[in-house]
Image (cartoon, rainbow, N blue to C red):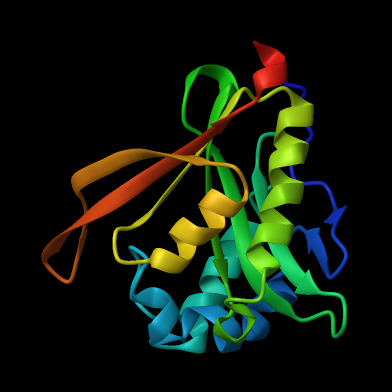
Amino acid sequence: MINHTGTIELNTDKFNLRKFLKDDAQNVYDNITSNENIAKYLTWQKHASFKQTEELLDNWSSHYNNRTYRWAICDKANNEVIGSIQVGNAGFNFHCVEIAFVIAENYWNQGNMTEILTQIIKHMFDLGCHRIEAKHHIDNLASAKVMKKIGMKNEGVLKDYAVKDGQYIDYSVWAIVNEQNN
């Protein structure tokens, strides 16, 4: 049985994880959605305007409930939103969830997502989730490295899993199981 809390505030050494606010739109646009290097490995296109990001944040911030798990990643040093994490139901009644994440380019390759995802996985296991999955664009080797560092195991390749710019893209799928729930 999952003990749903929705998006509650969590903390790591360097980051606060909290709900998105409408006021976060400028940070999200500047740090994430306007960056082509970030968008190239994701299924969405780079945002063409600030208004597009503003509409996204308006939607996200107004749709939280006790089964919504979407965190803004805030750098404790400057309180700037530099990423996001979303956990969604991937199986029956949240026993299996899928995690998706993105972080600003200037935070890449510094162990930041390892720190953050370790906290998220612990939290979701504490709530009663049994299995956590994640997928990444087959060419996104940095995400593969993060998934391996947080204890996930590679389960294979999903052939032609996504479409971007009219091209089919293979995705790699990873997972971790809460062995204490066996």
The answer to whether any part of residue 124 appears in the image is: yes
The N terminus lies in which quarter of the figure? top right
x 53%, y 67%: residue: 56
* Residue 170 in the figure: left or right of residue 179: left
- How many marks the image carries: the answer is 0
Q: Quadrant of the C terminus?
A: top right
The quarter holding residue 6 reads top right
- State left or right for residue 110 relative to residue 91: right
Name above or below for residue 56 compared with residue 78.
above
Q: Is residue 147 above or below residue 182?
A: below
Instruction: Using the image as rendered, state which of residue 9 and residue 62 is in the foreground.
Output: 9
Image coords of residue 93 (percent x, y): 56, 19
Relative vertical location of residue 160 with respect to residue 92 in this rendering, above or below: below
Based on the displayed image, in which of its 4 quarters is residue 3 positioned?
top right
Residue at the image point whose x is 67% and y is 53% from the top: 117
Residue positioned 62% across, 63% down in the render: 84
Asked whether 74 or 67 is in front, the reply is 74
User: Percent from the top left, x then y, of residue 172?
Assistant: 33, 49
Asked whether residue 66 is in view, the answer is no
In the displayed structure, does residue 37 sit left or right of residue 29?
A: left
Residue 160 at what x, y percent from top left?
16, 50
Residue at point 45%, 86% (across, down): 35
Residue 81 x %, y %: 71, 76
